[in-house]
Amino acid sequence: FRSRSLVVMAAVAAALAYATGHAAPPTQAEWQVVVNNGFEIPGHPGRFYNSYNPPSVNANALVVFRARSTGRQQGPVSGIYTRRMDIAGEAIHRIGDRVTQVPRPNNTLYPAPGGPGNEALATFNEFPSFPRIAIGSNALATRGNHKPAWTYVIGTDPDTGEPIETRAGTTGVYVNLRGEDPLTSPLVTGASLLGAVPNGPYADFSSIFGVPGEAPGTRFEVFPGAPAVTDDGYIAFKGNYSVPDPASVDPDASIGKTGVFYRQVAADYAGGLQPIGLIANTDMPVPNPGECAPGTTFGSTAPPSAYGRNVVFVGYDYEEAPTCGGIYLADLDAPPGEFSTLVGLDTRVPGQKGETFTE
């Protein structure tokens, strides 16, 4: 949506309110404004919304959206926001923006406004995907980019004896478990790039954030697309990573991989101690190979959707021109790789004389 446009989403709220008993059935469908360019951005006096990404909405009439202002000398305001649509005059709440501190683990200080000597922990600089929300609990999830948030020692300088430090963690999946009340429910970390960090103040980060099924210390490189979240605080997301190439004599040669993963997040340091779990990756064979050779593995996966203990995702042998693959349903209680085919490229299209789906 561009200049002078409106985000007009609350017609959905009327139906949701009726379905959940929050209001009498409307006598006439009537659109209401959730947010538009006349709204001042929370926490930024004098700055107004200008553009918006697709919103997400749940059965409690809570909407979450990504929005930004126009640019100025100090740059645009950009963030994630929520608003209750079933309460007249309810304010917009800021979940996170470019002045919000990255949730723990975050121990890296950077120069802050106010003059020399002022420092602050790493803050977000962008939210690259639209946020998503659980159907009933108001838990929400978003991706966030930022400066490296974690500084740690990787060795000792042999000449000086001084510790050698490095920084890590420039993107992640972040969760607010009660998005209707961000003042008492801050963001927590759901997934991050700290899977190669061997230790932390309360836990081994590599055991929490490492890529499951790979050698200890294997970290994610990026989390493409929008993460999903359930009422119980499970996130489901796509993750890309690399592993050493066993066929190469170059020790630095690697193979890029991708997959669909999950984690149960708690309102605690590092989002709790639960590790990331595996649903499917590019080492697993396509369960319905169709025209592919038996044993063909996934070449690509797409960001999933989730509800309860179930996750749905798309997987293909080759994303640009798929020959086999489909839409799959995974149960989080089942072992990795055990999922059902809902619709495959070998599935006949109803009413189309034997034609099958192509993508």
Image: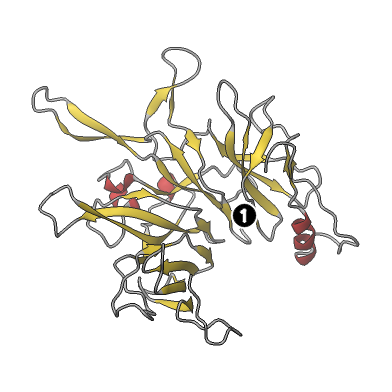
Image quarter where the N terminus lies is top right
Query: Is residue 248 rendered to the left or right of residue 186?
Result: left
Rendered location of residue 152, percent (x, y): 27, 35
Can the viewer see residue 208?
no
- Which residue, given by chain and number where applicable, does mark 1 sit on? 138
The correct choice, above or below, for 283 with respect to 203 in the image is below
Q: Residues within 10 Å of mark 1 (few under 14, many from 20)?
A: many
Give the quarter of the image for residue 157. Answer: top left
82 and 65: which one is in front? 65
- Residue at the location (27% across, 46% down)? 196
95 and 78: which one is in front? 78
The correct choice, above or below, for 189 with respect to 275 in the image is above
Query: Is residue 272 rendered to the left or right of residue 356?
Result: left
Judged from the image, the secondary structure of the residue bearing numbered disc 1 is: loop
219 and 352: which one is in front? 352
Which amino acid type is shown beneath numbered disc 1?
A: Asn
